Image (cartoon, grey):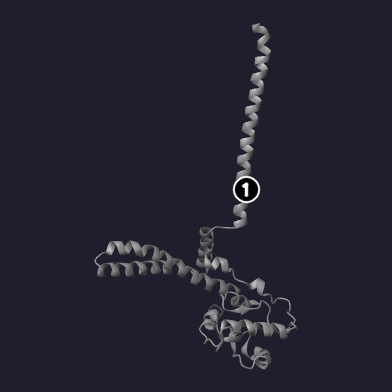
Amino acid sequence: MAKNSSPSSASGSTSLKEVKAMQRERRRQMKADKKNERAAKKATRGPGILSQLKQVFHMTRQHNPKLVLWMALAFVAALLIGLVIGLLLENPVTWVLIAIPFGLFAAVLVMNRLAERAMFAQIDGRPGAAGAALSTLRRGWIVREEPVAVNPRTQDVVFRAIGRPGVVLVTEGPSNRVAKLVQKERRTTERLLPNVPVRVVETGHGADQTPLHELTRVLKRMDKRLTKHEVAAVDKRLTALGTSKPPIPKGVDPHRARPDRRAMRGR
């Protein structure tokens, strides 16, 4: 009897081992699938905030070697402000601790400002750079990617931004060369919108020209003349009447000169 039960016992033991091996293999496969799924989600989301800040830091430091110094000064200034407030309130330790996160925020803010200038320096002089700078304007402004006027021979261009200050024509090219182009566009716009202010801003490094990194700041400081609804109405009218598009010569591509706004914001 003992000899007869041996084969069935061995067979049962073998089957149990096979089942356990299959279960282990299934668990390994499930772990591998979860790992691949996490990797796919991470790739879809892109780099995290810390990775983006690290990239922005290295890029800005290459352009401005004094980046660390300026960030340290911003951090120390925040700590000193907290210390002064704490001494006045007779609780310096607490206020210094409170000032630490504000110091970190100030350091990151300084880095973002310098990073924006570094990015503009990289695209400065390239065709479409003015349009790329305009694309960084926040809400309240309507900016078309394509220029509204182009000189195919010289590649001088005029971009248009519509906001509460009115219609702003932004030029790209030497003043003496782009003057005729922008004045023609200005007369056309004033004829279509007789009651809307039309202003001209020339980008460049010459006299009476605005450097690329200061362009958005200049536009934001202009006097506001329109309401938000009027801005939308002006854009609709210009879009409806401006049916013909200017020929864009090869090389004038705002997309190729567009700075990375997400990296500039650090998110």
Mark 1 — residue? Answer: 37
Say which quadrant the N terminus sits in. Answer: top right
As drawn, the residue found furthest toward the left would be 90
User: What x and y, as percent, mark residue 162?
Assistant: 61, 83
For label 1, count other residues whose C-alpha is less than 10 Å away and answer few (under 14), some (14-19) or many (20+). Answer: few
Examine the rendering and report whether any part of residue 74 can be seen.
yes
Q: Is residue 161 left or right of residue 85?
A: right
Q: Is residue 31 above or below residue 83?
A: above
Q: Residue at horizontal 68%, vertical 15%?
A: 8
Residue type, label 1: Glu
Q: Residue at horizontal 54%, vertical 83%?
A: 219
Q: Nearer the viewer, residue 254 or 142?
A: 142
Q: Is residue 82 left or right of residue 29?
A: left
Q: Residue at horizontal 57%, vertical 66%?
A: 262
As drawn, the residue found furthest toward the top would be 1
Q: Nearer the viewer, residue 188 or 218?
A: 188
As drawn, the residue found furthest toward the front would be 229
Res 187 quadrant in image: bottom right
Q: Residue at horizontal 59%, vertical 82%?
A: 229
Label 1 residue SS:
helix
Res 213 quadrant in image: bottom right
